[in-house]
Image: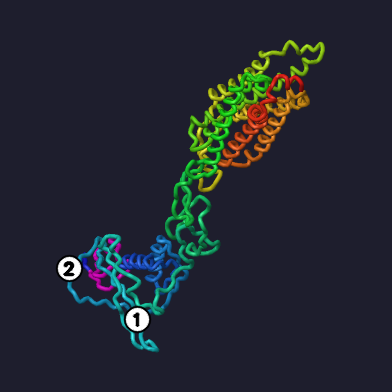
């Protein structure tokens, strides 16, 4: 059997690259496969993704459509139409003015470069035309250097490249939403959803930002969320609360000093001066507990703010309850044959105050032991913000603490209201009634505001309630007595009290 080696200089059909079928056929021109790669790279460079194919109506043309379509589809380019023509004119004419050494590849084909030319026509009837070299494609070069081409090098008919897209490019911050019943190249650009970004053009999907980040306005970058809490640097409310707390605490200390100075006078001794001292000290601490609620919350301040405030405020209300109980028992014991006389004395108010306060102390210890409050990062209540706040830990212990204080205040109000019409020597009951009315009104009004807010605004509501209710108790109970001690000393005499 005699075999011959055939060297072709014009055949480009990829079928001839099959070494099993054509082992002795070699070519001095690149096969169509390289042209397909070059065409696809050119379309990608021009950002065209909606094209048509025109080829010959024969076996070669059908094979060409099949192979080129595969390359186009793999690169996301849609084929709008395919036209087969029976006759066509081969217009491409290659010139080689320089001799260079070439070699065949493993398929027996020439891997040489392809020139990209621009067909330019001139004249009214396009009677003159010529080819203009605008780039080349060389498969032997590295991937990113194979195509040497720029759209600026082409002489376009209207001065700019025509559009070869079904839909406009989707910019960063948007994603492609395919139109039902259309090519994949036909889509709408929809903005990324809340909490998502896309940082490149024509994104198929948007990416969700990490939990501690949030998209910028353009939705193309995830930025750290803003942290929010009652800050000394950013919030004027913190300065107002701080100054108010210090002023009220200083006022309490000032009144305590006045009471200590006049501790032996009748008006100070009339309603158990020791309870008055305890009440003033606890009110001072109540004002100062405000600072535990201000600034960036941490675990230790979260534990102290609830437990300390609950115990200190309970001591204040327990002292008021002990005062009210003393007045109530004294009023009952004044009746002939009353069995309440055995309860009259110093032991009863002290016992009431210690017993009521100890219940809150026990609740606080159990709270810290079982499920203490802790710092919490709330990343979901407000978009783009991280709320740094205190988690109560045990919701039951939290409501027991606040509910117990409300119960003591309600009992004090009822008892004080019952004895509000006593003679003037015991007229503290009227002031206690009004102070407890202010106290209960403030905290009842605070409940819906507390439940409807989050973050620093919820803390601001609590701080406002602490300052207002404590100030109400301080002013209503002690200011009338301070006025008498400083400006009406003639009324601070045992004879006047007994006469009244």
Q: Determine whether the residue tagged by mark 2 lies in a helix, strand or loop.
A: loop
Instruction: State the residue position of label 2.
Output: 101
Q: Quadrant of the C terminus?
A: top right
**Discs 2/1, front:** 1
Spatial separation of the CA atoms under disc 2 and disc 1: 32 Å
Percent coordinates x, y for residue 366 in the rendering: 57, 22
Q: Determine whether the residue tagged by mark 1 lies in a helix, strand or loop.
A: strand
**Image quadrant of residue 450?**
top right
**Category of crowding for the residue at label 2, using alpha-carbon neighbours closer than 10 angstroms: few (below 14), some (14–19), many (at least 20):** few
Instruction: State the residue position of label 1.
Output: 120
Looking at the image, what colour scheme do you see? Answer: rainbow
On screen, 234 above or below 161? above
Which residue is pictured at 27% across the width and 73% down the height? 10
Percent coordinates x, y for residue 299 in the rendering: 49, 31
Lower sequence index among marks 2 and 1: 2
Q: Is residue 322 in view from this perspective?
A: no
Which residue is pictured at 53% across the width and 51% down the height? 194
Q: Which residues are magenta?
A: 6-30
User: Toward the viewer: 443 or 31?
Assistant: 443
Percent coordinates x, y for residue 248 in the rendering: 58, 33
Which residue is pictured at 81% across the width and 15% down the height? 335
Q: Is residue 85 left or right of residue 457?
A: left
On screen, 73 above or below 486? below
**Image quadrant of residue 478?**
top right
């Amino acid at each position: 059997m005699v075999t011959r080696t055939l060297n072709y200089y014009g055949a480009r059909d990829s079928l001839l690259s099959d070494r099993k079928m054509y082992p002795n056929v070699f070519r001095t021109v690149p096969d169509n496969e390289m042209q397909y790669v070059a065409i696809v790279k050119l379309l990608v460079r021009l950002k065209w993704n909606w094209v048509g194919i025109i080829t010959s109506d024969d076996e070669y043309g059908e094979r060409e459509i099949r192979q080129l379509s595969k390359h186009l589809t793999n690169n996301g380019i849609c084929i709008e139409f395919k036209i087969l023509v029976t006759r066509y004119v081969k217009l491409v004419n290659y010139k080689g003015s320089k001799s260079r050494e070439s070699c065949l590849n493993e398929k027996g084909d020439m891997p040489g470069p392809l020139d990209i030319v621009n067909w330019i026509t001139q004249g009214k009837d396009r009677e003159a035309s010529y080819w203009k070299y605008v780039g080349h494609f060389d498969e032997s070069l590295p991937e990113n250097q194979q195509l040497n081409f720029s759209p600026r090098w082409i002489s376009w008919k209207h001065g700019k490249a025509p559009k070869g897209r079904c839909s406009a490019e989707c910019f960063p911050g948007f994603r492609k939403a395919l139109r039902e019943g259309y090519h994949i190249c036909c889509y709408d650009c929809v903005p990324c959803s809340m909490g998502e970004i896309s940082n490149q053009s024509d994104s198929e999907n948007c990416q969700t930002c990490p939990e501690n980040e949030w998209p910028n306005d353009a939705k193309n970058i995830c930025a750290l969320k803003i942290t929010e809490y009652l800050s000394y640097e950013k919030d004027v409310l913190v300065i107002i609360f701080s100054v108010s707390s210090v002023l009220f605490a200083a006022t309490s200390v000032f009144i305590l000093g006045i009471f200590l100075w006049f501790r032996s006078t009748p008006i100070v001794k009339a309603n158990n001066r020791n309870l008055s001292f305890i009440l003033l000290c606890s009110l001072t601490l109540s004002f100062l507990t405000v600072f535990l609620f201000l600034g960036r919350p941490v675990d230790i301040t979260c534990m102290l703010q609830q437990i300390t405030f609950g115990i200190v405020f309970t001591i204040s209300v327990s002292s008021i309850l002990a005062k009210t109980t003393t007045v109530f028992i004294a009023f009952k014991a004044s009746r002939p044959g009353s069995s309440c006389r055995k309860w009259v004395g110093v032991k009863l108010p002290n016992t009431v105050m210690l017993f009521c306060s100890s219940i809150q102390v026990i609740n606080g210890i159990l709270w810290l032991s079982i499920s203490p409050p802790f710092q919490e990062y709330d990343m979901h209540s407000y978009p783009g913000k991280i709320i740094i706040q205190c988690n109560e830990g045990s919701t039951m212990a939290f409501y027991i603490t606040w509910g117990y204080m409300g119960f003591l205040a309600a009992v004090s109000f009822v008892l004080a209201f019952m004895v509000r019409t006593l003679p003037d020597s015991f007229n503290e009951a009227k002031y206690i009634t009004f102070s407890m009315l202010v106290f209960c009104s403030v905290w009842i009004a605070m409940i819906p505001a507390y439940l409807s807010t989050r973050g620093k605004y919820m803390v601001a509501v609590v701080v406002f309630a602490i300052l207002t209710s404590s100030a109400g108790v301080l002013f209503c109970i002690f200011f009338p007595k301070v006025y008498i001690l400083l400006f009406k000393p003639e009324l601070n005499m045992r004879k006047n009290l007994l006469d009244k």
